[in-house]
């Protein structure tokens, strides 16, 4: 049995932060979980997708974050505890319902997980979603460890239900992808059958009603401010003359630094767990008796500005600093050594940092950038389409594995903003340049927000070629299913939506279907489509080979090898497509048969026909 | 209680994250506090995979520059790339078998002279242990047990608050049943290397 399902309180398990969130939701008796996957949140939905059936939780991969939150709004307003999970930028997509749902309120607790990513390990920007608290009156909880991720998830449901408003659990990568020992609590009774009570005066966001609800929201806010000053999630430690205010992972770095620096008696710590609403009185009391205060928080000076405001309002002269040239940067993650160093500097403590060994006499190292996998169908499509359309063509694309196609040698991307941006941005480019843009997106992003862009392109008579690279899965975030996946094959009770039918229904006439690995077919479709005036679509199909293997989908596998008698060593195979299965053997191209997926793309590029299938899989494995 | 900071580096597919988790599980078995940190996502597409473990009375799992007590390198070029994590007090345990990046395999970039670089690093750190982990894993019966070989070597050569027995229990409890025998053998071969 999965330990997360244990009904025995007191057990201790080593859990990923995201697994701890799942456990917290289970302990809280969650009945509905919705999401759109995205790093660093993905293990929350991935885990629920495996266990929800066993415990009677309704779980879905929704088509996008806005949809996930709206489905969750429906279940929570009907009295069911609901978890809605997404990454930082996903909250931007869900912001529209979020900022009004807070007016309407909920009956069952609704917890929105916002997994932020300082340092942008796998995200397109570095945004601090604590500002959604200020923007929309969303209560925000920030755990500092996997144990707290569990405990605060549970508390978030209770708080949400008590206040009848959605609550955001704001984490960062170093919480989501930390692993720590988590002690389990008891599991509450799960309620999964809801009742929708008609209550138009509270549930319909039209001006006349929202004006009333706006006042109620402000009253709730005042209650929350008071509550925050005594909330157990806000911790006060020590009694020193100096002070540190911190939250989230910053607290872990501060705690370790104070131990390492032997400074617990000098510096006391105010760790805020509930960071919106800001507990003004608690912070004022803390500031008042301190000689000076340092604020330790990644990304924006959110707590720092709040503390400075409180100090001003309360006439407290204590020096408060955080983000500054000499202390902390707004950019990127912190680390323990950096926080220790800044604390020692700001409070003038004795500290001899360790120094790294000299590295300037060590050799220069080759880069090891992430790349499209061997046998990735995106490589084939990106190569064939861009070479057929001409490299002077604008190539907007969006978020997915294929974003890696911007690199040498493919150079198949010129403009990438966010999910859903490829088609509309291509429309804007084509409209003003007169060049037919080629817009690349995947199957999951097509259903996420590509369809609305396609409808706009047809409706407003734009001139773009839309290339939908259908690999049957949401590959980048770890192979989640989406509306276009072959659910029957995966044994899932879902309805499959056919991308071609959707495109036709949206009014696209010029549609081409191609097999991604057939370069001639994809090129021919591209050449035809580029001559067409208006919206064209190419659906390039080939299942992601990693997904096929993971899902046990049988694939006919060959591997390819270079015939040295025919090879002229022109190296087009290497230079054109950048497949990581290639290497040089005695200065001639060779193919690593353990990496080769048998896609045959290289063999179609070789003008000497020197690359040929070697053996059937059964013979080489 | 003493504090131990371990920094782990390697390449996607080498099983570094599994090794990281096993250190954590061995600590749980030993009754020690453990914090682990991983990066998922883009890093796994053939890129560098870095993770860390801290043992003892600590809340944070990250290992800053110069602060690794142990550097566990699964690939020689990545060990060299992580040299800034080392101070003169660091113990380095590294695999000496290169896994060349694509750019090297296809002649665009040069792979460094590993033995020369290792000699230089060796003079700067407390202890430097280099093993042919790929070959050892192969002789254990499966090249994929490379990560377990590395753990065995670490337990032998580094100053850890964990025993070989803690790791063996973790292997039995948390690796796939059909690989347990190979993994135990890989651990022993790693432990007795050098």
Image: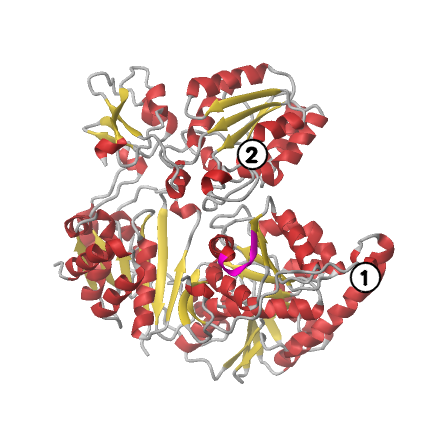
Label 2 neighbour load within 10 Å: few <14, some 14-19, many 20+: some
Residue A253 at what x, y percent from top left? 46, 69
Is residue A477 found left or right of B162 in the rendered image?
A: right
The label shown at residue A415 is 2
The label shown at residue A16 is none
Residue nearest the viewer, comparing A453 with B178: B178
Task: Give the total number of marks visible in the rendering.
Answer: 2
- Residue found farthest to the right: A208
The reply to whether the magenta stretch includes residue A55 is yes
The residue at the point 17 percent across, 58 percent down is: B185
Q: Is residue A96 visible?
A: yes
Residue nearest the viewer, comparing A42 with A462: A42
Residue nearest the viewer, comparing A333 with A527: A527
Judged from the image, the secondary structure of the residue bearing numbered disc 2 is loop
Q: Are marks 1 and 2 on the same chain?
A: yes
Q: Nearer the viewer, mark 1 or mark 2?
A: 1
Q: Quadrant of the C terminus of chain A?
A: top left
The reply to whether the magenta stretch includes residue A298 is no
**Image height of A333 relative to A455, above or below:** below
Q: Which residue is mark 1?
A: A213
Magenta residues span: A54-59
Residue B21 at what x, y percent from top left? 34, 61
Q: Quadrant of the N terminus of chain A?
A: bottom left
Label 1 or label 2, whichever comes before in sequence order: 1
- The CA span between labels 1 and 2 is 42 Å
Residue A222 at what x, y percent from top left? 75, 72
Chain letter, disc 2 residue: A
- Determine the image quadrant of residue A200: bottom right
Residue nearest the viewer, comparing B134 with A267: B134
């Amino acid at each position: 049995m999965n330990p997360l399902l244990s009904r025995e309180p007191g057990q201790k398990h080593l859990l990923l932060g995201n697994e701890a969130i799942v456990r917290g939701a289970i302990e809280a008796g969650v009945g509905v979980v919705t999401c759109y996957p995205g790093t660093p949140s993905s293990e929350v939905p991935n885990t629920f997708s495996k266990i929800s059936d066993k415990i009677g939780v309704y779980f879905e991969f929704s088509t996008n974050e806005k949809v996930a939150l709206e489905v969750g709004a429906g279940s929570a307003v009907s009295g069911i505890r609901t978890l809605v999970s997404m990454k930082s930028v996903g909250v931007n997509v869900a912001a529209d319902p979020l900022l009004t749902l807070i007016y309407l309120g909920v009956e069952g607790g609704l917890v929105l997980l916002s997994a932020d990513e300082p340092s942008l390990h796998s995200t397109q920007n570095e945004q601090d979603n604590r500002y959604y608290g200020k923007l929309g009156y969303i209560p925000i909880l920030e755990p500092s460890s996997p144990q707290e991720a569990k405990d605060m998830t549970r508390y978030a449901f209770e708080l949400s239900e008590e206040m009848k408003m959605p609550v955001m659990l704001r984490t960062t990568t170093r919480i989501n992808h930390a692993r720590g020992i988590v002690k389990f609590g008891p599991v509450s009774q799960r309620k999964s059958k809801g009742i929708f009570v008609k209550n138009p005066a509270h549930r319909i966001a039209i001006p006349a009603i929202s004006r009333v609800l706006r006042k109620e929201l402000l009253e709730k806010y005042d209650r929350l401010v008071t509550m925050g000053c005594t909330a157990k999630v806000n911790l006060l430690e020590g009694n020193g003359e100096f002070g540190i205010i911190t939250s989230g992972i910053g607290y872990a770095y501060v705690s370790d630094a104070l131990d390492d620096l032997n400074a617990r008696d000098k510096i006391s710590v105010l760790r805020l767990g509930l960071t919106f609403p800001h507990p003004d009185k608690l912070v004022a009391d803390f500031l008042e008796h301190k000689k000076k205060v340092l604020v330790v928080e990644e990304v924006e000076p959110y707590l720092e500005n709040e503390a400075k405001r409180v100090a001003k309002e309360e006439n407290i002269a204590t020096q408060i600093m955080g983000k500054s040239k000499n202390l902390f940067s707004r950019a990127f993650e912190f680390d323990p050594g950096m926080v220790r160093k800044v604390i020692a500097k700001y409070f003038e403590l004795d500290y001899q940092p360790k120094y790294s060994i000299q590295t300037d006499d060590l050799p220069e190292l080759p880069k090891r950038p992430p790349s499209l996998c061997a046998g990735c169908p995106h490589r084939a499509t990106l190569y064939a389409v861009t070479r057929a359309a001409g490299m002077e063509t604008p190539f907007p694309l969006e978020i997915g594995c294929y974003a890696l196609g911007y690199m040498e040698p493919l150079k198949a991307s010129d403009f990438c903003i966010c999910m859903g941006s490829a088609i509309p941005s291509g429309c804007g480019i084509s409209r003003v340049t007169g060049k037919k843009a080629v817009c690349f997106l995947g199957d999951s992003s097509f259903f996420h927000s590509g369809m609305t862009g396609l409808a706009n392109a047809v409706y407003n008579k734009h001139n773009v070629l839309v290339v939908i690279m259908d690999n049957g899965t949401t590959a980048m975030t770890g192979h989640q299913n989406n509306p276009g996946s072959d659910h029957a094959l995966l044994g899932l009770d879902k309805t499959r939506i056919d991308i071609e039918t959707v495109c036709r229904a949206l009014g696209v006439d010029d549609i081409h279907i191609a097999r991604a690995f057939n370069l001639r077919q994809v090129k021919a479709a591209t050449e035809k489509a580029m001559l067409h005036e208006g919206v064209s679509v190419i659906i390039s199909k080939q299942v992601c080979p990693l997904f096929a293997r993971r899902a046990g989908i049988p694939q006919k596998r060959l591997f390819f090898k270079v015939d040295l008698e025919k090879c002229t060593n022109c190296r087009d195979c290497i230079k054109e497509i950048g497949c990581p299965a290639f290497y040089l053997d005695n200065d001639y191209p060779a193919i690593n048969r353990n990496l080769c997926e048998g896609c045959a793309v290289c063999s179609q590029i070789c003008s000497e026909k020197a690359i040929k299938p070697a053996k059937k899989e059964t013979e080489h494995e | 209680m003493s504090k131990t900071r371990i920094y782990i580096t390697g390449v996607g597919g080498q099983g570094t994250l599994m090794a990281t988790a096993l250190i954590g599980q061995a600590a749980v078995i030993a009754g020690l506090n453990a914090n682990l940190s991983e990066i998922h996502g883009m890093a796994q597409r053939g890129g560098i995979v870095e993770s860390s473990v801290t043992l003892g009375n600590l809340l944070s799992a990250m290992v800053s520059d110069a602060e690794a007590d142990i550097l566990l390198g699964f690939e020689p070029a990545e060990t060299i790339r992580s040299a800034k994590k080392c101070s003169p007090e660091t113990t380095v345990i590294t695999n000496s078998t290169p896994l060349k990046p694509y750019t090297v395999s296809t002649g665009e970039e040069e792979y460094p002279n590993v033995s020369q670089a290792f000699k230089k690093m060796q003079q700067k750190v407390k202890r430097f242990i280099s093993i042919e982990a790929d070959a050892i894993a192969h002789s254990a019966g499966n090249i994929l047990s490379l990560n377990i070989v590395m753990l065995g070597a670490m337990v032998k050569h580094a100053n850890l608050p964990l025993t070989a027995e803690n790791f063996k229990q973790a292997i039995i409890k948390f690796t796939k049943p059909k690989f347990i025998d190979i993994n135990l053998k890989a651990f022993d071969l790693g432990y007795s290397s050098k």
